[in-house]
Amino acid sequence: MSQVFHDIEKKIISSLRENPKQSPESLEGSTGLSPDQIRRGIEWLKLKDLAIVNESKASLIRLGGNGLESIEKGLPERRLLDSLKDGPRRLSDLQRQLGSAFGPAMGLARRNSWVRTESDTVSLSNEPAEIPAERIIRQIGRQKIPKEMVSPSELAILLRRPDFVIEETVKTKVISLSDSAGSLEISDSSGAIDVEAGVPRVFVARTHPLKDTIDEVREIFVTLGFSEIIGGMTQPSFWNFDALFTPQDHPARELQDTFYLDGILAKKIAMPEQIRRVSDSHRRNWRYRWDINEARRMVLRTHTTCVTIRHLAETRPDEARVFSLGRVFRNEKVSYKHLVEFNQIEGVVVGKGVTLRDLMGIQREFYKRIGIARIKFWPTFFPYTEPSLQTMVYNERLGSWVELFGMGIFRPEVTRSLGITKPVLAWGGGIERIAMLKYGLDDVREFYNNNLSWLRGVHQDAGS
Ligand code: PHE
């Protein structure tokens, strides 16, 4: 694959291809880039696994004060020998001429038999062509050089003399190309930005698709002029069932359908008047012995209709448009289409002349806004509505009709007992079902699997 590089990277790569191991300083020299550009370029190449940086410590040497002086004037011993070239000299004379250098110079010269002394006269006996230290001093000159470049034994001699050589340790970087840089083709679109170059995928934080759907549903009802009402997730059976004209022996109340809060009975479930009229209605219409203790049993709400009916019983409005939204619980076997906890949306319209036709109109509008075009209504049954309908929506992908919201007009047995005098259009259903259609899922459990690749891949604005 041909990759596009920044000019800086290109210069560094081609310099390293010619000279495979380099310090940042030598790269500066060979590329003409600034230290800062070199530093950045190396960093980029390292991130792309194209450059390797080895850091090591190196010992460098340079001449100290005495060393530098002897470049110009010669080493003290050479100066001594030079001043004897024209014949023997007196000790005191030489001492004056050479100053502090005299002692060490004389010592060396004697030890190596370069000079002879007779009483107070010194004469040359055997002048060496080169003194080892001279070669090293010439070699180092005014530079800093790696210690390895000079002979260790010669350096040792020089190090014994004060301020001739100074040794320092420096950290050095050696830059080289990695194996993968070898096979690399460098595009020569000089410095242009390749807008089609591959980029790493990043996954930014996002909301869960189900949460998106919940928010969208809420938004639609708010836009349609509804207000949200909120109720508790635990409710006395009275509000979840009795107030909704669901007889106490109704199968929905069985343990295998409903979660009861074990041993918890609500003390105050409703106003005495409400309890009296609701229980009367049960006795008269369903003809059984209504038990207040059954109505006290606390449940995890099995639908949001309990929130609706409590609100209506409390406010007894002549007109209302409210909705509620939240988690409900059913003691069911988890499967591709059932969860024990899921989310419901529920709404009501209360008003003098409202009819079933209005109810169906609202449904159509809602489904249209959420992106579901083909719907139809089927008759069904709920204990608390009459007539009762069910929306069926067409799943294009599966080529079949699936049931969505339940709805109907609250029965007088429900409303009259609670002092609600105007007709109530009510509907409700699962949000997961809608989200499944939106995201094309066949298994509702997928929303709770935390499958990252699905969550990352799914589009926020998925339509059905
Ligand atoms: N409570 C019903 C359910 O959970 C839906 C519904 C709400 C039906 C209001 C009629 C009226 O399926």
Image (spheres, helix red, strand yellow):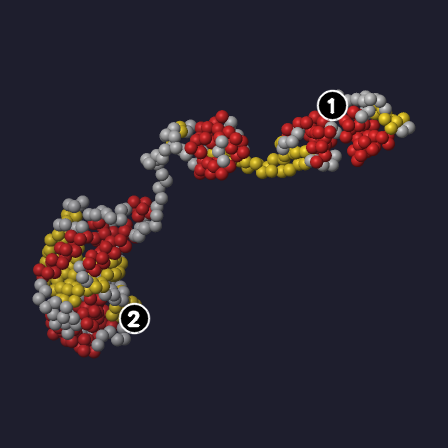
Q: From what the image shows, is residue 257 above or below residue 289? A: above
Query: In the figure, residue 168 lies in which quadrant?
Result: top right
Report how many numbered discs are placed on residues in the image: 2
Q: Amino acid at mark 2?
A: Ile
Question: Residue visible at 28% across and 46% down?
Answer: 458
Residue 67 spot, x, y in % from top left: 71, 33
Q: Is residue 255 left or right of residue 97?
A: left
Q: Residue at x 62, y 38 (%)?
A: 169
Residue at the location (15% across, 64% down)?
A: 349
Q: Position of residue 452 (x, y in %)?
A: 33, 47
Quarter of the image for residue 264 reads bottom left
**In the foreground, 267 or 35:** 35
Q: Find residue 281 and report its horizontal and vertical position in percent.
A: 13, 73
The span from disc 1 to disc 2 (Cα, nearest Å) is 109 Å
Q: 119 or 84, which is in the foreground?
A: 84
Q: Nearer the viewer, residue 444 or 425?
A: 425
Judge whether 336 appears above or below 286 on screen.
Answer: above
Type of amino acid under label 1: Glu
Q: Which residue is mark 1?
A: 130
Dot 1 alpha-carbon crowd within 10 angstroms: few under 14, some 14 to 19, many 20 or more: few
**Label 2, on which residue?**
264
Q: Is residue 180 left or right of residue 408?
A: right
Q: Quick one: label 1 or label 2, which is nearer the N terminus?
A: 1
Residue 363 in view here: yes
| Residue 134 x %, y % | 72, 27
Tag 1's secondary structure?
Answer: loop
Please, is residue 183 above or below residue 332 in the view?
above
Residue at screen point 78% across, 33% down:
101
Picture layout, residue 366 above or below residue 104:
below
Give the quarter of the figure containing the N terminus: top left
Binning the other alpha carbons within 10 Å of mark 2 as few (below 14), some (14 to 19) or many (20 upward) gives few
